[in-house]
Amino acid sequence: MSFLLPKLISKKEVDQAIKSTAEKVLVLRFGRDEDPVCLQLDDILSKTSSHLSKMAAIYLVDVDETPVYTQYFDISYIPSTVFFFNGQHMKVDYGLLPYLAHHADGNCMQKTGESGRSKPETHLIFGPSASGRTGL
């Protein structure tokens, strides 16, 4: 399904998309066209893109063709999704909601399971993560 969504094949194209997408969320899916999991995500993104067209622009970015951004965003899982709004990178954490302890000062502390790793859930939390890293 990768052929149904626009692709950004160079750093210059990614830069241009980030700078020129205004008043919409920019969704960049980093991955590989031949990866089966990427194809599944691409299918979902392509089916929703027309419904989201007024609020989001969705692009595919090949990790091998844009190594600068792959390194910059510390892409270590394929596929990974990065979000921007008005040229600003959105910090997104996945799966932390039931495991956060909220403090009176507004700071959050991530609780972990016995293994020392957070347990994944389907909730989204927008804003800075407890670790300061994005939820890629």
Image: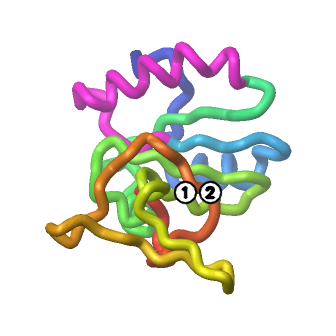
Query: Which of the 4 quarters of the picture holds residue 76?
Result: bottom left
Instruction: Farthest residue to the right: give it.
Output: 23
Query: Which of the 4 quarters of the picture holds residue 26?
Result: top right
Q: Is residue 54 above or below residue 122?
A: above
Q: Could you tell me which quadrant the C terminus lies in?
A: bottom left
Q: Which residue: 73% across, 24% down? A: 53
Q: State the mark number for residue 92.
A: 1
Where residue 15 sits: x, y (%)? 63, 55
Q: Which residue: 49% across, 75% down? A: 130
Of 131 and 6, the residue lying toward us? 131
Taking the image as shown, residue 24 lies to the left or right of residue 96, namely right
**SS of the residue at dot 1?**
strand
Q: Is residue 23 above or below residue 108?
A: above
Magenta segment, which residues? 29-52
Instruction: Farthest residue to the left: give it.
Output: 115
Q: Is residue 109 above or below residue 97?
A: below
- Say whether marks 1 and 2 touch (CB < 8 Å): yes
Of 98 and 24, the residue lying toward us? 98
Q: Which residue: 66% across, 82% down? A: 104
Q: State the mark number for residue 126.
A: 2
The amino acid at mark 2 is Phe
Q: Could you tell me which quadrant the N terminus lies in?
A: top left
Taking the image as shown, residue 134 lies to the left or right of residue 14, namely left
Where residue 24 sits: x, y (%)? 77, 41
Of 4 and 91, the residue lying toward us? 91
**SS of the residue at dot 2?**
strand
The amino acid at mark 1 is Val
